[in-house]
Structures are given as structure tokens and as C-alpha cells.
Image (tube, coloured by chain):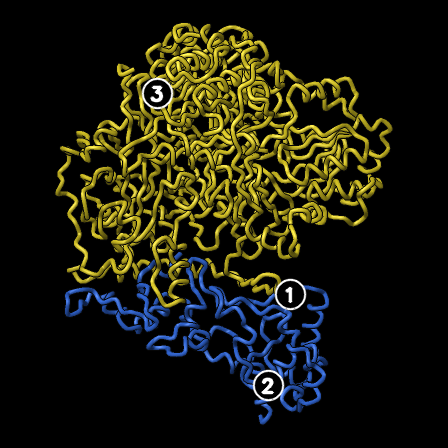
Amino acid sequence: MKNGIRRRDFFKTIAAGGAATVAVAGCADRPEKLIPLLVPPDNIEYIPGMPVDYATTCQECPASCGVVIRTREGRALKAEGNPDHPISQGTLCLRGQASVQSLYNPARLTSAMRREGEKWVAADWDAVEAEVAKKIKGQSNKKAIVLMTSNRNGTRQKMVNQWLSALGAAPKVVLESLANHNIREANKIAFGKSELPVYNIESATYLVNFGADFLETFQSPVRNNREFANYHAVNEKKAAKNKFVNIAPHVSLTGANADQWVKIAPGTEAVVALALAGEVMRRSGRGDGNLKGFLSGYTLEKAAEASGAKVEALAQVAKEISKASSALVMAGGTLVASETGTAAQVAVNILNHVAGAVGKTIRFGTGQQLDISTPTSEVLALVDRMKKGQVKVLIVDGVNPLYHLPKSADVEAALAKVETIITLSTQWDETSRKAHYALPGLHTFEKWGDANPQSGVESMIQPVMAPLFPVKSSEDTLMSLGARMGLAGFGQGQTFKNYLMNAWKGKAGGGSFDAFWRAALQKGGVFAKVSGGGAALSGGATKMNFQPSKLNGTGLVLLPTPSLRQRDGGQTFNPWTQEIPDPVSHVVWDSWADINPKTAEKMGIHHAQQIRVKSPFGEVVTTAYLHYGIHEDAISIPLGQGHFGSGSKAADGHGVNVLDLLPAATDKTSGEFAYLTTRVEVSVTGEPSFLVQTDGNPRQDDRGIIQMMSLEQFAKGEPPELPHELESPHYASDFYRNVPRPAGYHEPYRWGMVVDVDRCTGCSACVAACYAENNLPVVGKERMFLGREMAWIRVERFIEGEGEDYTTLMQPTMCQQCGNAGCEPVCPVYATYHNPDGLNAQVYNRCVGTRYCSNNCIYKQRRYNWFEYEFESPLHLQLNPDVSKRSRGVMEKCTFCVHRIARARFDANDEGRDMRDGEVTPACAQTCPTQAITFGNLADPGSKVSRMSMRDGEGTPTGKRVRQYEMLESMKNLPAVTYLRKVTIKNNEKEA
Amino acid sequence: MKNINLIGPFWKAVSGGLILLSVLSFTPAAFAELTDAQVAEIPAGDQPIKFSHKIHAGDNKIQCQYCHIYARRSWSSGVPPVKVCMGCHNFVATDLAEIQKLTKYWDDKKPIPWVKKHDVPDFVRFPHKKHINAKNEVFPDGVPCQKCHGPIETLDVVEVQDPKFGEMGWCLKCHLTIPGVKERKKNIKDENGKLPFAMHPKGHHRPALTDCLTCHK
């Protein structure tokens, strides 16, 4: 600069040279077209360029969270939780965030089709519909017509039932891989109530969980996450924290959040629960004499012997349950779903009964309606009928039995025997490829409907945009088929919307239906509070066989576990669910097999080695993942991968389907599919494996990236000692000089964030929300392997402790928007700088891609566009027009959703004021089911973020900081993100 | 031009449905002057219909925002819905060949593929409404449309008038005239040693009008 050439002039000179080349290439912008509306809509205040939000319901899983879909110019862009909805309360999980990708799924079926031989031929809708109607009507034995549908309740099921009975066909078959029949049946046996109660985690003071993955897929994950965080987060005023004990053979995300893991052998849940019940009863005196007699047969010692758990650990849990004012024991998921899964649930019911949970934390009469599925035993019987040729017409409505039932059930052979298969699915999948006719359905966000996930919660489903393709909703198709066949109650020209409105007429009460309907649509449904009550234990509860069921085969016990990201495999088509790492294993785009390192050592298996897993029913080849969070006698493979016939690039050919290893077995009492049935032989293949993990080093090595403190330290108000690397850094601490900002630089805003690590469960919803909001490309497995993922926020995971005595620490990590950033001084083109709002701005137009900034970022938050990434059509329709789509050669990173700040700021300015606290929320904070992320203005001492972070806009502490810390503080980068330490409960077994 | 004062009531009347009445009370001098031959003399652009801003906004003094209804409400000004055109051209100059082109689009239920002339790059957030509703010391009545778009009301064929339109320096030329912005950019402190942060007359802090992130997405 002193030598006479200014930086800008220098670049102008270079640019002039560049411009000449450009001019020769004739690279002028193509003229854009301005396409006006013909007639502006009159029912909404439609303004081009302004978002319009619609309330509807997410149907990615049966939990049916209320969502608000943001649309722009008639395209759905992003799903967010509906704040008025009692289940989601404004937040959403990873799969819910990815629901927009199932709307814009490149593998969607786009028109009516007919299969000719192996070839699918697009055809006129009416012609196919008429042909299908003729086929169904022409079927003389109406009982040979079967309709398979998905586990989503609401008025649609009423219509389907009416349709089937008018036709005279067999009752519908509802498929669900993660069913709750064991729980319902056990409640019937133990309490005489055949229902799924609401687990009120929030109101409990002690939580024991037998394997239910309630933070991932079990029942209602968004609500569970919220309630669990409220339950488990440290109570700042009382300096108290509720304890969560996980009793299971495998640690998934839910288990990783536990304060204590009691490792038990697979299938011994019932014995352990009964032994705990006996001990709790002895200590608390609850329960009657009969029960006492029965439970005397189950001692802690016997349970310890059967399960391999320590007696002391079990005794401690029993003691703590009996002391707790409001205990809750949960059980469920695939780990408990053995052939005697119902018995395990009954045993847990007995434990809940003696713990006094029933009526308090478990309330009957509140009815979760989220499982209306047909027991798998009946589905398998149907498959047998199909094999015998007794099913002539099969209508497949949004389910994929060929993938979701084990290979040993041989659904493929069964489908081959069916004369006519009609698929109403929205997308290609294994089953719809086997169909003869396709009358594709619409995605939830394009159609009408309702859902009733819980008593009192009537959730609306309304179209938020016009259908993407000229197809009809499956409900409308059925109704129109009904009209063609002249079924009673199905007139010509009737639509499901009218049917739905008629069904809702009864709910309107006295007033005008139109007003009621509009209000329901606006709010997202009609919500009433149902409080429910308790239930008495019946004598039949003790008459079950509580011994572990016998397993097939030899070797390690196979534990198939639901996937946080893909549930049972229904969400694998959405690329975000593949690209976002599993928070515990940090594996992407693949299956893996958790094996205990001790077992692996004995078997000579190394981490990330390719292994062959063989059961009596089949074999798969996958990759070993050494993980202390699994029983020595077990191996765990997640569900959801191994699609082969969906035509979706995101799903096909990735990982293995663990169901290939399982027999078509079901629970003896409830008929639910039994996951825990098989032992497998594991051997090393010797072939190289290609497992991609994004975690790098799972150890912190004293860097203090994620910090924790004990409850005692918190109670005393003493921050813990800093880890070695932070206390005495090996680098010169004056290297990073502080750049002083002039007074008033950060007026009136200095954006900052507080992340409460104690509340974070690692559910990764924030990551998916960021992908949805900020047009992040999906790069695929190979590029992930090269470290070229584009996520602007990641859930960092570190393991503390040795062997099985370990703690999993998780923390969402985004650009820290440093006040004294490492990236800024090294940028030669001034593309990144500290802006007056305290943001670490990244100007894409200036960036020339030197990547110096990335190299100098101590948080590894900068992402480089190595390629022009493709958004496969029609996924590109999801792109947010408020955010630039970055091109090749440009560095990018988290912006604190600066476009949201801009909109909120201009809206506030329109009213002649500055923004208020809480007026703007970035996508990650908005969706967080546990509300672990708080965003706000550090320059405003009254803002929530200032109070929580205990610092002002310039980083000066405003009070005693106990839980607050900044990541890698000693580097003096002055991050704008403050973390709150995780508070751990010291687990002292000797006290018991 | 003595009929100008009739224009306002005329539009209200049309939208109010009192069509017949207004057509009767309307002296056709202002609108019915043009013939196909006259229209033919107007230079042709690359637009699908020979639409003249001069005739509409200049000769007939129709307010910009009568047709560009979204400009004051939205970030993008939008382009008038075809219904807005038809609001008048159901009755006005229906015999002209160019108007019949419009009627054909309307009858076919097809939008008119206008060619975009004033194109702000996609990587910029340009809120039209903030500019039109600015009402500050420099622009007490908001930024006039002509400030950026040029003398539109004199143009038969709209082309970008200022060759620097849409360049960053061109935007900043105006932003730097807003009080306080230049001082802040140049780090000129006030008497208290603080950076000035001029308040908007409405009572809020102005966004940093020279900050990259204010405009760049």
C-alpha cells in the first residue's frame, strides 16, 4: 500500500485483463423473462417476492408434527414446526426438515403409467384409471382384492375403509416397520387398556429407559426431545439435575445422552425390570401381596447373572427409583422387540406400577393414536395368501413391503403371483417397480387430509402448493375409482377435500363451518388438552413367560436399530438424510456394524474393516465399527439402507438392508415384527472397505472443545479447571493480536449465539435445517471422504473416558463469527471481514478461492466449492431465493442466516424501530427440538443471549461465568458463540 | 390534455364496476386518439407487445404504481398481472392490433413473456419497497422510480438508460449521500469519539448502507 499501488487498483488492473477475455468469449447474460400472473389470487394477500406460510402436517413418520411450510412464488421451500401445534411446538426433527426433499424427490412418479413387460410406459390418466377400475370391478372374488396402506391415520383411513367395504374387499392392511403392538398388548394385559399412553417425560424426576430410541424414532421424537431436554437440563436455580439411566445392550443416540448406562445382555430386559420391581417394592412398600410373592422369584442377583450387569448398579437404580417422587420407565424400539417382546413390556409395566409412574408420568386415556398398523403376523399371513395365488388384485398405497419385510418372507415371489398390482405411491421404490399400473399419488404438501396423532390433536393437512406433476392424491384416485365402479357413497366428481370437510362438519360445533374451517387451516388443526389418568395392575400381568426368547443361529446377537436419519428406510430417498452424519458414529452414506472392541479383538476384526455377517437366513457384507457402546455378545446394524430398486441416486446401492439377515418372525402375543431373533456369524472378508466417517479424531486430547462440569462444581459456582491445552497453550498467545474496534462499531447490533451443550441431544435437526435454508449442496460419499462436505453446521462428537466408562459429548458447531477472526487478515481480496453487525461476512463475489481463510480457521468451519454442484431436478425447486447459490471456486460458511436478519430488520424498520429480541432466529435455532440454541443481540444487555452468555457486545464478562465458555478461548479469536458446559451427574455406585 | 383530471375517477369507476356510466361520461380524446397507423410509427423493441410507457405514464399520466402494484409492497417490484392490463383494455383502445395481441393472451389464459430490462444480479438483495418507502432526509417522498430507471415516462421502448445501472458503484453513489454513511465508512468519529450511526427520521438505526452484507446475499 505504501508503495503506491492500492489493493483495489491492483485488482482493477487484473480485472481489466480478465474482462477482455470475457468479452471475446461473448459471455453476456441471457435476457431473462418477466412472467406475470394472469390473475392474482384473491384469497390470500399474494405478493411476489414475499414468502407465504401455510400450516400443515408432516407425514414423514406417524408422529404427525404440525409444520408451517414457507412458500415462495408457489413453491414449498422449507418446513418449520408449527408453534401452535401441541406436538411440535414450533420445532422439527431432521427427517421433518428433509420432508421438502421427499416432495421434490427426483425419483417421483410423474404420470400415470402402465407396465408392458419390463418396460414402463406413460399413459393417459383416465385411460389407466378406467382400466384399473375395470380390473378391480371385474374381479369376481372381492375378498381377493387387498389394499396395503401406510401407517397414517385420520379421515383418509375412514374413506379407505368405506371404499373397501363398499367394494366388499378384505379389510385394509397397514404396514409399519416400527410398530407399537407390544406396548399396546402389554398395556392390555397389565392394565386392561389396549392403548398407547403418553409418556410425560417432562414431569418425571427419574427416567429409566429399556432400549427405546425415544430421541430418534420412538413414537413422537420431536416431543420426546423437547420433554427430555426439559427433564434432563440442569435446573439453574436449584442447581439440580434429573438423572437418566439407560438399560440396554446397545447405545444409540438416546443412550449416548444417558447419565448412566447399565449394559445388559440382549433380551434380558424382562428379567432385569422384574428384579428392579422387586427391589423397588421392597424399598417403597408399594404393591400388593400377590405381586410381592411373584416378584420374590426375581432377585437382583439372578437378574445380574442373566444380564451380565453389576448387582450394585442395579441396586443403585432400584434405590433411586424408589426414592424418586415421580419416576418413569420407558421401553420399546427394536432392542426389546423379540419374540417375547410383549412379556418384556409387561415386566416394564409392573416396574412402572411399583414405581408409581402409572397415572403420573404415564397417563392412560391420553391415547397416542400414532399406530394403526396391522400386526406383522397378519401381514405375513397375507404374503402367504399371495404366494398361494389367493390375492388377485393388490393396491399398494404409499408402502414398500418388498423392502420393509425381510427377504426370508419372500415378498418378491408373493408379488409375482398377484395378477394385478396397482401402485398409488408418490415415488419409485422396490414395490412400485413390481406393479402393473401406476396411478401415482401426491406428496403430503400437495394434498388434503388430516392426522390424529394423539387424542385431542386433530391436525390439518392442506396443499401448500399446486401439484408438481399432473397426478392425483391417492385419496382422490381411490374416490374416483370408486365412482367409476359405481361404489355406494362414491359419486362422480367427488373429491377427498369435500369428503374431509364433511367429516370435519361434526367438529365445528354451533358456529359457522366456514369460519371454523378457515381457523383450523390457519392454526394447523384443532387442539384440545386431554389429561388422562391412571390404571390398576391386573393379575394377568404376572402370568407371562418372562424368560429371554431363544435365538436362531450361532455367533453374536444381531441388533437391528432404527436410524435417526432414515427411520426404517422410508426417508433414505432424501439425500440430506444420507449426507448428514449419524451423530454417534459419524458415518455417512453407508451401513455399519457396531462391535465391541473386546469382541473384535478376539475375532481379529479391526475398525473399518469389511466383514461378512451371516445368519441362517441370509448374509450381508458391511463394515465393522468398533464401539464400546454395545454388549460384547452383540452386533448392531442400523435399518434404512440397502435400497436397490427405487431409482433414487440417494438411496440405491448404499449400505445393506439388515432385514436380509432376519427371519419372518413375530411376537407370539402381539404379532409385532420380532427384530431380536437371530445370532450371526461374523468374519473378515479381506476386501477393502469404504466407510466414510466425518469425525476425524474422536478424542479431544485436552483441547477442551466441548467442556463439561460436574453438578457439584455447578452448585458451588466453580468453573472447572481448563484442560491442559487451554490452560497452557503451546503456541504464542500474543500471535493473534486483538484488533480494536472503534466505539460504537457494533451499534445497535452485535449478533451472537448461545448453545447449551447440556440441552443438546445431538439430534442433528439443526444440520438439516441449515441444508434446507442455505442451499447447501449434497456432495456424495466420495467427496465426503475427501473432506469436502458442505455442511455449515455440524454436530461435533467427542468421547471422554476410557473403555465402557465413557461419556459422549455433542455440540452443534457453526462459524463462530469471531470478533478477531483468523480468516479475515489472511484474505488477500478482502472477501471476508468483520461487519458492523458483528458478523464475519463472506462476500462470494469477491472470493477468488485462495482457501487461506479455511486454512487459518481454527474451528474448521469454512467450506470450499470444489465443483459446481448439481441439484438434481426437481430438487432445485427447493432452493431458497434469498440465499445465493455459490458457484465453483468460492468459499462459503455459516452466515447466522443473514438473509433472515435482513428481512426482519427491514420489517422492523418499516415500523420505524430497531429489531426486538427474539424477532430473528436462524434456521438451526428455529428448528432445535430442545431449544439448545439461542440467538440474539449481544449489544443489547437485556437480550436473552446477553444474559445467558454473561458478556457484552465486546466480549467483556458481565458477571460470574460458571457454565459459559468459548470454544478454544485461548486462541483469542473472540467468538460470538458462547457454549454452556454440559453438567454431568457423578455416578457413585458406592452410595447405593 | 384537459381530460387528465378524469383519469383518476375513471379508474375508480372501472374497478367499482360502474363501467357503463364512466364510458358515457368519458370524453374519448385522451385514449382513442391512437390508430394502428400511429402505433406502427412507434419504434419496435423486443417485447412481445409494443407497450409504450410514454403513452401510459407520459401522455396519460398513469401513476407508475397503478400498474406496478407490488413495488411498494415487496422486495421485488413484480410485473403487473395481465388482469391489471385487461382492467382498462377491456374498454380502451380495444380495436388496436397491439391491444388485440394482449386480448389474445388473456383469452388464451397465457401470461405475457415480457423481456426483463432492469435486471439486478441474483446475488443482491434489493428491496424495492425499502427504496420507494424510504422517506428520509435525501428523499422525503421516497426514492422516485426515475432515480434508477431513468425517464421511463418518455420512452416508447424501455432500455436501460444509465450504462452503469446495477453496478455496485452506481448503487453506492446514492447510498453515500445518506447522512452518516460516509462518516462511518471513513471511520470519522463524532465529538464523543464514537462512530456516528445516523438515525433514520422514522426513529430506527439505519442499516450500514455501505456494508457488503446489506446488499449481497
Left or right of A962: which side holds A687? right
- Which disc, if any, is residue A320? 3
Which element type, helix, strand or loop, lies under badge 3?
helix
Q: What is the three-letter code of the residue carrying label 2? A: Ile
Q: Position of residue A468 (x, y in %)?
A: 63, 48
The answer to the question of whether label 3 and label 2 lie on touching residues, with beta carbons closer than 8 A, is: no
Q: Is residue A573 visible?
A: no
- Label 3 and label 2: CA atoms lie apart by 83 Å
State the CA–CA distance, disc 2 to disc 1. Answer: 24 Å
Q: Chain of mark 3?
A: A
Q: Which mark is residue A38?
A: 1
Q: What number is the disc on residue A181?
A: none
Identify which residue is drawn at 52% across, 10% down.
A546
**Which percent across, then down, holds residue A767?**
42, 40
Contact check, label 2 and label 1, Cβ < 8 Å: no
Amino acid type of disc 3?
Glu
Mark 3 → mark 1, Cα distance in angstroms: 69 Å
Image quarter of residue B165: bottom left
| Chain letter for the blue colouring in the rendering | B
Quadrant location of residue A485? top right
In the displayed structure, A972 sits above or below A843; it is: above
| Palette colour of chain A | yellow
Q: Nearer the viewer, residue A853 or A202?
A: A202
Q: Earlier along the polypeptide chain: callout 3 or callout 1? A: 1
Q: Position of residue A741 (x, y in %)?
A: 19, 56
Q: Which residue is disc 2 drawn over?
A: B7
Tags 3 and 1 touching, CB below 8 Å: no
Local secondary structure at mark 1: loop
User: Would residue A255 be seen by someone viewing this image from the given angle?
Assistant: yes
From this view, report whether residue A480 is shown above or below residue B1: above
Tell me the chain of label 2.
Answer: B
